[in-house]
Amino acid sequence: MGAVSAEEDTLPSAREQAGQDQAGLEAIFRDAGQPTSRRVRALLRAMTLEEKVGQMTQISVQALMSSPGYPYGSGPLDPARIETVLGDAQVGSLLSGGGGAPEENTPRAWAEMTNTLQAEALERSRLGIPLIYGVDAVHGHNNVLGARLYPHNVGLAASGDRALVADLGRATAAQVRATGIHWNFAPVLDVGRDPRWGRFYETWGESVALTAELGTASVVAQQGEDLSAETAVAATAKHFAGYAAPATGDDREPALIPRRQFADVHLPPFEQAVGAGARTAMANSGSVNGIPVHASSELLTGVLRGDLGFEGVLVSDWEDLRRLQTVYQVAPTYADAIALAVNAGIDMAMEPLNAVEYTTLLTELVEEGRVPMARIDEAVGRILTLKFELGLFEDPFVDPDEAERIIAGADPELARRAARETMTLLSNDGTLPLAPDASVLVTGPSADSMRNQLGGWSIGWQGVPEGGPEPEGTTVLEGVAAAVTDPAQVTHLPAPTPDEAAAAAAAADVAVVVLGEEPYAEGFGDSDTLELPAAQQELLAAVQASGTPTVLVLMAGRPVVVPGALEGSAAALMAYLPGSEGGGAVADVLFGAHSPSGRLPFTWPREVGQLPLTYDAYVSTGYEPALPFGHGLSYTTFAYGALTAPQQVRPWETAAVSVEVTNTGDTPGAEVVHAYVTDWPAALPLAPLRELVGFERVDLAPGETRTVDLTLDLSRLARTGGDVWGEGEREVVPGTYTLTVGDQTATFTVPDA
Ligand code: GLC
């Protein structure tokens, strides 16, 4: 919300608004030709405190349904609950959190549900304020049966492809908006520093560069040029900030993050996304250095607003105001918790179940003077600004037929292309690519499981509900069967005993063993071992012992520890959680239709005891993981030629760097070029082993040479000064740095500022 301009002072005064000027105010905020800030001011002046507090409240759609599992599960909309939430409490926002589907989960039914809720809200809003509806569409419109689901972020990070991430962001936004939903709680911008964490797969891995660049590409693509467009949604920079580093690796456990690391690792992706125009942010459910983030005015106002300049809507995470009382016990009552969080900077509470309790308490807090009216107006001003920018006052309704057409008609090729680009070849003794006339054993729990392939946040919060309808797509088994010359050559054993597996493998030319994780989300995915179940390890060992070349395919949201996996296999492919068409993409790689190009966006530890182990840490004892950050093989070979970099780069500028890359093999392939700074001036603080400062993906035909242009963002080299407390400013230490791209190096100097 900007300062009041001269024209805005011409609004009818609050004193006059009681009379006929209510109509005058209405004429202004209903006029789409007026500046948004003027419309907001006029509407704020017309609103009562109760109406304002309702706008600061977000309720789960499941709390408006009558379902056996109320307030969870799906069921018909309940008129009494609609009256309570949208009438009595004047709630201005609803969400479908991790599911929250209409009874019949179809695109049409979603659009009909949101249309109904909009109409119910408008009917009960004296001033005709529309709802804003939010959802977690974190890998496509993943709550909707019939939508194509895309790879989760951790795999997309391996692709190094900003344009691909933008394509997926646009496709997702168009599908979400088509169902009458305007706000996507995505992307995650937390830097994934600990693979034990149950949300690691939602991150872009452990590097600041991949997180910041790809996360921002998603934000920009989802929001587009015009937020009121039918293809645009408001994106969410989440979870601000320091959420991905719980000390124990367990979700929402306390994080202890030195100021230097917080500023140098955890903040930059949010800074870049805010700078690129992210319209909303979501607060971190966890605590940082002893302070629950929802109670931290330092983070939610001082840093997010003051340092990063964020002007959008800050929403809480699920039930996180109440958790200040019930979990963190830093507030004696719920009212105290609400005061703490709203005064710290929370604009909207994802309450998400008790509309009347929340609005009543917040109203009382304002009347008691414990929450200033100015804070309410600031929060509601941001929320109304977002609703005006989304065009919701002009038309909040959608066409159910269009929703069906857009979602059912989404191009599966985009999902398959995206999955292909994530595929990361970990090892290969030449067994891959397979000949199409090979007789193939396909086995393992994830060989024919759409549920495992999609992972969490798919139809249901914890993944596709068991026994429920399976989303469309292509599993590995289906992909392999389509790739061989004769499907009769494919033997599928979904769950053999080790002996059965060994016998079947012995009879085949090659055995494809697809191991992986069951779906999970949040704390349910926390792992103390990173290991796969013993049965999977036994299955792999039995197949390996058969003597038949074993190709291991891993479908997991993290680096899993499988003893002997690489050593005993002819080849190993990391497929991450590749989405609806992931099985087809795996087959494309196995049979050579696509040469893999993914690079690990994380360090693959030999065992969990090595953690924390990240590529950018200062490790005097040496960085010796099972596989390093950036590892990835191809079916062809590449050579790097001339690397050109400027002699001198000023601290906060970007630098144009270029390098020649040649495909020296006889197979087409893509190379994800990573540019690292590998040597630093001898100065405080400790320098990382290497820092990713640029990346680009390039497709090359056999024998083709391209000059790849990279933009080095020198801010990636900034380190927080000061002594042990990190009390200094962020600066790029002057001196000489070494840039390494492939096997080429160049030095550049950063002059004194
Ligand atoms: C969850 C997640 C958050 C999500 C929200 C709504 O608990 O922490 O990422 O956006 O609730 O589903």
Image: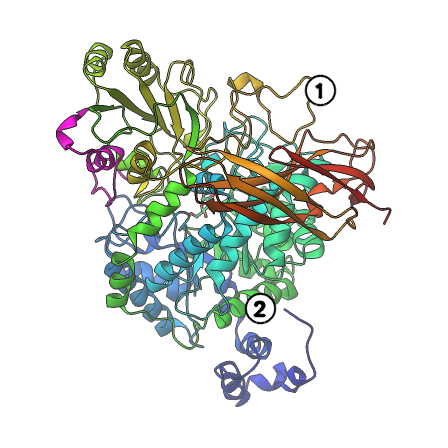
Kind of residue sitting beneath label 2: Gly
Task: Check disc 2 and report its element: helix, strand or loop.
Answer: helix
Report the residue marked by disc 2. Answer: 381
Residue 753: % across, % down: 85, 50
Kind of residue sitting beneath label 1: Ser
Q: Is residue 77 visible?
A: no
Q: In the rendered structure, which disc, 2 or 1, sits on the residue that comes first in sequence? A: 2
Left or right, 615 with reference to 725: left
Q: Which residues are magenta?
A: 464-493
Tell me, yes or no, whether the two marked residues, 2 and 1, touch with CB atoms within 8 Å.
no
Report the front residue among 526 and 553: 553
- Verify whether residue 472 appears in magenta: yes
Q: Is residue 274 above or below residue 149?
A: below
Left or right, 554 with reference to 659: left
Report the front residue among 200 and 559: 559
Residue 733, image quadrant:
top right
Instruction: For marks 2 and 1, give the one nearer the viewer.
Output: 1
